[in-house]
Image: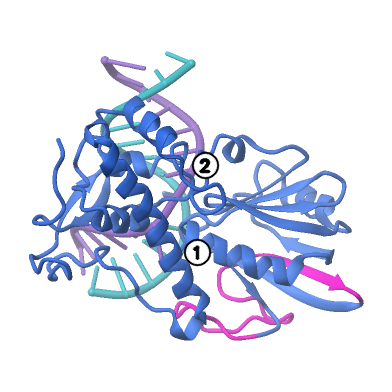
Chain colours: A blue, B purple, C cyan
Amino acid sequence: MPELPEVEHTRRNLERWTRGARIVAVATTDARIVRPLRPRAFVSRLEGRTVRAVDRRGKWLRLALDGAAGLFVHLGMTGWFERADVGGPRNPLLSARGDRASPMRFERVRFELERRARPSVVVYVDPRRWGRMVLSDADIAPWTTLGPDPLSDGIDVDALSAALARRAKRSIKEVLMDQRVLAGIGNIQATEALWKARVDPRSRAGSLDRARVVELARAVRWTIRRTLADLAKGDRGADDPFVAYGRDGEPCPRCGARFTKVALGGRTTTFCPRCQARTA
DNA sequence: ATTATTGTTGGTAG
DNA sequence: TCTACCAACAATAA
């Protein structure tokens, strides 16, 4: 599910659902997701706190709590939040809709909240349990070591060029997905941005001239805003807005050649062999 | 049955 | 200390 646009969408939901609310009760038994704390400690340290704000950097979320603590959340590959007492499941994996009595399938953490005497329930669901929830009084290393966030910080072309030069021999695709270079770019957004910028994903990061880097920065903004706009249409309107990702064998909408795929850094990468130029 | 999947992380080797 | 590579994590769909 989550790259930057999905996580930003999640942030906006969580802000509406939790900002200003007191965490009345927490239920979890999942030691993997809440590590390094034990579930018991995680629960007792969280209960009674109030959510001050919901921030995001790249694919990480931070629920700022009173008392200087923060709950740092990463959705892994398959995590999402759901308000358990309203709306149905948006994921076809789910058979049951969540409510207080019956946990949703793959529910991992349940938050009971209260705001101005109004109760609500928010659950974290994660079939594969690759997500994390780290409760910490200080910002954690995965959060502080992230590169600039393309949506909230923008992309500085000089800084990006320097970062590419430092990783000159690696493929541009792999470097784009390096969270220290730009925070929040994953396989989908990298694939889409490289198509938009007409850059072959196998090109060495150091081989892009300045004009190409400018194009690439623009393309990253384009795909993020586009995906986010699609998500904002809601669960109904949101569909598959991707041009290149997952389109192996289909015609490129720009030049008509068939998309092909290659593995880079262990991840499938789809690209148009005609209009995405290899720079080196 | 086999392979692939929107992502990190911890190990090892260099 | 840094990079590159890989298996692992877990559940599903094609």
> In which image quadrant can residue B11 be found?
top left
Q: Is residue A80 above or below residue A52?
A: below
Q: Label 1 is found on which chain of the structure?
A: A
Crowd class of label 1 (few under 14; some 14 to 19; many from 20; radius 10 Å): many
Q: Circle 1 — which element?
A: helix
**A66 vs A226, nearest the viewer:** A226
Q: Earlier in the sequence, mark 1 or mark 2?
A: 1
Question: Which residue is disc 2 drawn over?
Answer: A148
Which residue occupies 47% across, 36% down? A180
Q: Amino acid at mark 1?
A: Glu
What is the number of the mark on residue A6? Answer: 1
Magenta range is A87-116
State left or right for residue A74 relative to residue A193.
right
Q: Is residue A171 above or below residue A38?
A: above
Residue A265 x, y percent position in the rendering = 28, 41
**A182 vs A179, nearest the viewer:** A182
Crowd class of label 2 (few under 14; some 14 to 19; many from 20; radius 10 Å): many
Residue A79 x, y percent position in the rendering = 53, 62
Q: Amino acid at mark 2?
A: Pro
Residue B7 x, y percent position in the rendering = 44, 50
Q: Quadrant of the N terminus of chain A?
A: bottom left
